[in-house]
Image: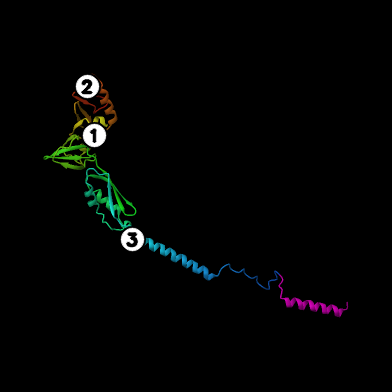
Amino acid sequence: MTEAGTSQADTANGDASESTGADVPGDGTTPPSEPPSGRPKGASRWKTAFVALLVLGVLGTASWMLLGSKLLVVRHVEVTGTKLAPRDRIVATAGIRLGVPMVRLDTGEVRGRVERLREVKSAKVERRWPATVRIVVHERVPLVMVERAGRYYQLDEDGVTVADSPARPPKLPALSATAPGPTDPATLAALHVVAALPDRLGRRVVGVEAPSPESVTLRLSGGPSVVWGSDDRPEEKLRLFDALLKTPAGRAAHTIDVSSPEVVTTR
């Protein structure tokens, strides 16, 4: 081939390369194109807005049902666990207004009002959806009675008066103390002694004398008086008392003194 032919061939190859516009990979002359997106950006924004509106709608509906509608309001009040306090008085004291939204009911405030009743030791207030409020009452249990001015007052283990009546209540021992009440140490000692007695012995107690916290005496029906002393060491004192009742001296005794478990006496 002649030089002229070679020159014409080179020129033709160069023209062909320019006409195709092909780029050599990695030559830095043209940036690589980005892959096309799967969906338009506008559609994504619409989807986000739709989800936000849906959430707001759900929250708004829930708020309306809880606060504004008549679907979830108080329609019934239940009371359980009460014997001393009448149900109607507990409901009236609770002050629950029918028709108020359940979510707005302040259960702590209701509980506080119910617990101010003298018969109530503690209370629990529960929402029972969709429309019922339940009041669970734990009442005080009378242990002894005190007679004053022709009336009989029933005291629980804390010395709180839970009931009173003109007639003597049956099956409650009479307490004799200088100043019976929740702040009197002698009264509290006597109540602790009675509360610690097993039923088999507690049923026999007809009277309790407490001139001081260390000088509690139990009077038993059909049996001796028991000088119990203070309210400490009740298990030891009960064990010694039971043992003495099995002896001839114990059965014949008018008084059994277990106030000092180290030295038990009878007379």
Amino acid type at circle 2 is Arg
- Which of labels 3 and 1 is toward the front? 3
Main secondary structure of the magenta stretch: helix
Q: Is residue 219 magenta?
A: no
Q: Earlier in the sequence, mark 2 or mark 3?
A: 3
Instruction: Please tell me whether residue 18 is drawn above or below residue 108 in the rendered image.
Output: below
Q: Residue at x 73, y 78 (%)?
A: 19
Where's residue 258, x and y in %?
Answer: 24, 27
Residue 251 numbered mark, or none: 2
Residue at image position (41%, 64%) is 57
Label 2 SS: helix
Q: Are marks 1 and 2 in contact (CB under 8 Å)?
A: no
Residue 56 position by quadrant: bottom left
Q: Residues within 10 Å of mark 1 (few under 14, many from 20)?
A: many
Q: Is residue 50 left or right of residue 198?
A: right
Q: Nearer the viewer, residue 243 or 154?
A: 154
Q: Residue 92: x and y, percent? A: 22, 52
Which quadrant of the view contains residue 249?
top left
Residue 197 point in image, percent of width and height = 26, 32
Q: Kindly give the residue lying farthest to the right in the view shown.
A: 1
Q: Which residue is mark 3?
A: 67
Residue with the mark numbered 1: 194
